[in-house]
Image (tube, rainbow, N blue to C red):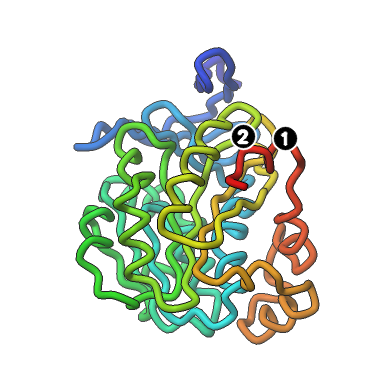
């Protein structure tokens, strides 16, 4: 038993802490402070600038909902762009879809990828070596700015909150470029925080997405590590019908994609239900 603790301060006046079994890495990259440690309750944990990004114990909730919901809502996504997600978990879930032909992942901080490969190998599994994967250490903003029009079917943004290195992924320019590089039924999803404590994040990013996409909404996931209740995942699509498929149709698509029965959180029913928002969350979306 150790008396070492990691304290995570959230929302200025609230936080959580983890008892540390063993510190595995502490690195200052060109972009942020990175720490990886073994916890007593959540397996291995990665923090960026003191904020928990992922834990081995509950990463499946976030990763499954961030990847499977947009891909199965689309139903025919072949080319997927992932921004951030340096731990490889989103890449792994995207590549579980046998219908996906290409997944491009752009992560600005190569140290996140290196440390995830070394200390959190189970999160990405074999995704790093999948021939359909292209992993780029670079600036996601520049990538979306230069990507050809209609070159992707879905964009998945797994970033920190809109401060520091992640701030540029929540701008009008970024969403406009996402709309341009997406195909006719394309969509983009990204984390929008815990609205019980971060309502401004959901409200403001939804207004920005509305400038570039006709269908703007959000869906929820209950990730234990992201304390404060439901976490919202922002949704922006060119086609509003993507949110309207029922559980039977989503199940059919999941079976065709090869992921039915291969998840721990996502199900067709959870998929549909995640868009049925509590009023305290829905009130922060554009009318």
Q: Which mark is residue 33?
A: none
- Percent position (x, y) of residue 129? 37, 73
Is residue 7 visible in this depiction of the protein?
Answer: no
Q: Write the residue at 74% across / 77% down.
A: 251
Q: Where is 127 relative to 137, above or below? A: below
200 lies above or below 150: above
Between 251 and 126, the one lying in front of the other is 251
| Left or right of 248 in this view: 181 | left
What percent of the width, then of the height, locates residue 137? 24, 57
Residue 195 circle label: 2
Horizontally, is 42 left or right of 6 in the view?
right
Q: Element at badge 2?
A: helix
Q: Residue at x 35, y 40 (%)?
A: 166
Q: CA distance from mark 1 to mark 2?
A: 8 Å
Residue 157 in view (yes/no) = yes
Residue 280 is tagged as: 1
Q: For residue 25, what is the image quadrant? A: top left
Among the two numbered marks 1 and 2 on one chain, the one whose residue lies closer to the N terminus:
2
Q: Is residue 98 left or right of residue 61?
A: left
> Against 170, is 247 above or below?
below
Query: Count of labels shown?
Result: 2
Location of the N terminus (image quadrant): top right
């Amino acid at each position: 038993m150790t008396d070492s603790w990691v304290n995570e301060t959230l929302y200025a006046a609230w936080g959580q802490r983890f008892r540390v079994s063993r510190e595995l890495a502490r690195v200052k990259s060109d972009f942020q402070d990175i720490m990886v440690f073994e916890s007593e309750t959540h397996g291995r944990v990665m923090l960026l600038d003191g904020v928990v990004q992922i834990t081995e114990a509950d990463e499946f909730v976030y990763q499954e909902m961030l990847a499977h919901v947009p891909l199965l809502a689309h139903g025919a996504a072949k080319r997927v762009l992932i921004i951030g997600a340096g731990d490889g978990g989103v890449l792994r879930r995207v590549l579980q879809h046998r219908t996906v032909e290409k997944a491009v992942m752009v992560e600005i901080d190569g140290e996140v990828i290196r440390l995830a490969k070394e200390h959190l190998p189970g999160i990405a599994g074999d995704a790093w070596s999948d021939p359909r994967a292209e992993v780029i250490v670079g600036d996601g903003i520049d990538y979306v700015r230069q990507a050809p029009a209609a070159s992707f079917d879905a964009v998945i943004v797994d970033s920190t909150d809109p401060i520091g290195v992640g701030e540029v992924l929540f701008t009008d320019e970024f969403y406009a470029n996402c709309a341009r590089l997406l195909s006719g039924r394309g969509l983009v999803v990204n984390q929008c925080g815990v609205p019980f404590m971060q309502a401004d994040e959901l409200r403001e990013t939804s207004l920005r997405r509305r400038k570039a996409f006709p269908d703007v909404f959000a869906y929820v996931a209950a990730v234990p590590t992201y304390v404060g209740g439901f976490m919202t995942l922002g949704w922006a699509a060119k086609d509003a019908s993507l949110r309207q498929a029922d559980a039977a149709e989503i199940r059919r698509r999941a079976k065709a994609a090869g992921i039915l029965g291969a998840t721990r959180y996502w199900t067709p029913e959870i998929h549909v239900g995640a868009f049925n928002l509590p009023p305290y969350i829905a009130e922060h979306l554009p009318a």
